[in-house]
Image (cartoon, rainbow, N blue to C red):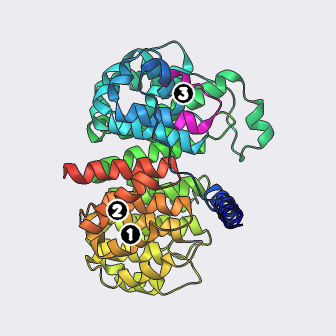
Amino acid sequence: MANRGNILNMQRIAMKATLILLILGVLGLLIFGCLPKAPRQDFPQEPAAVIEALKSPDQERRLEALVAIRRQAVLLENDTIFPLVLSKLAITDDTERGAAELIVESCREVMLPRLEPYLKSSKFEDYLRAAAAIRIIGQPAAIYADIVGDNLKNSLAKNLGPANKEPPTDEAVVALSREQQQEFKRRLASLWAIEAMGPNVCRVYAATAMSVIQREFEPGADFNLKVAALRILGVLGSEAQSYLPELIDLLDRGGDNLSVRSQLLMTLGSIGSSPEIDVVEKLSEHLTAGQYKERLSALEGLARLGPAAKSTAGRLKELMNDKNLGVYGQAAYTYFRVTGELDPAIPVLKAALENPSKEHEILEIIGRLGRAGEPLTDTLVRKLSSPDTFTREYAVIALKNIGVDSSDVISELRRIASSDPDLFVREHANVALQQLQQK
């Protein structure tokens, strides 16, 4: 009987153990099956594997390939990988295009010498993609100024149809011939590239830019060309003051549309006042404009003027406390730029961050403060724990731009770089860490 009792006890123990293991298994499935998986780190390394991943139907795999390329710039020397990366600069998907832009930003020295054959290519798409890379690379790409300038002038010399003074309808845009669409894109890409090449190149093409601003084009979204041309004059700053009368006349006539008018306000702020024209007064007239974008642009114009617009400090303080006009965040930033005083702006920016509809806009503004944004570092670090992917991304970029390498910032960026569920956010954190370490 004793032996039988021992056997029964052993059976009961075995059954309990099996039940416990079963329960643990179910709990494990419920818990770990529902939790997000750890970020994959098995990025492709060899060129053949990278190419295969870049062509994968799985976007996550394509993004992993782009990350691998950014981390191994030598992969850009591959004749298949390089054009595939360039092609990503022209796609509509923000995530993949952003990942490709990070490659160009991080690997400028490798990218730059390989662009020439694409800029000279007879294929329209090659030129657009190379010009997009120039826009990211910036002033070092001025070695290609003649090629880009010739493309712009040759395109502008073409007569592609009658001017359309009315806002283009969807039907008008669709009706554009293939050649018209291509030339519009060529012009726009060229203007953007010239702006990125810096003042020396912009100086050469200032008159061409002004002719674009004053010109009537074929049907289509020609206002984008005027916006890009206005940005070129903005790069020149006070050197472009000879164009102020024409620009003010355009502003007084109401501009072509909201986009042109808004860029015009910012460009005027970059150029500044002349003995004959008070730009501060002109910009101040638009601080309470009916369009939100126009109000923001007037504030940005004043911010670019800096101390020259200090007379508007009182008006800016009013806007910082005015929730109805909705520009309090930009007003706080502008107040700092024109007065040099950050303390009154900090509580406004912190409060604005608690408004979900303003959060991304304010994070971008804080990043533009540069090192002066250091008092807001702790607030940005807390945003790294946001459930919103874009909030974490904007917070990482702001921390990178501020450049404070405190232990808390480094620790949080490392956490994001290793465990954030979004691959793009992780890569932004890696870039931020690299820049902070270089400093």
Q: Left of 313 or right of it: where is 210?
A: right
Q: Look at the numbered disc 3 and give the secondary structure of its residue.
A: helix
Whether residue 262 is situated above or below residue 95 in the rendered picture: below
Looking at the rendered image, the disc whose residue lies closer to the viewer, 3 or 2, is 3
Residue that carries the numbered disc 2 in the rendered image:
399
Q: Amino acid at mark 3?
A: Leu
Q: Left of 178 or right of it: where is 260?
A: left
Residue 358: x and y in percent read: 55, 71
Dot placed on the residue nearer the N-terminal end, 1 or 2: 1
Looking at the rendered image, the disc whose residue lies closer to the viewer, 1 or 2, is 1
Mark 1, Cα crowd under 10 Å, few <14 / some 14-19 / many 20+, is many
Alpha-carbon distance for marks 3 and 2? 30 Å
Q: Left of 382 or right of it: where is 410?
A: left
Q: Look at the numbered disc 2 and give the secondary structure of its residue.
A: helix
Q: Amino acid at mark 1?
A: Val
Q: Look at the numbered disc 1 and give the secondary structure of its residue.
A: helix
Alpha-carbon distance for marks 1 and 3? 33 Å
Instruction: Check whether the beta carbons of the residues at disc 1 and disc 3 lie within 8 A of each other.
Output: no
Dot placed on the residue nearer the N-terminal end, 3 or 2: 3
Residue 259: x and y in percent read: 57, 54
Residue that carries the numbered disc 1 in the rendered image:
381
Can residue 304 be seen in the rendering of this structure?
A: no
Residue 53 in magenta stretch: yes
Residue 87: x and y in percent read: 53, 27
Mark 2, Cα crowd under 10 Å, few <14 / some 14-19 / many 20+, is many
Whether residue 32 is situated above or below residue 210 in the rendered picture: below
Tell me where the magenta segment starts and ends, as one range. 50-63
Query: Which label number is shown at residue 54?
Result: 3
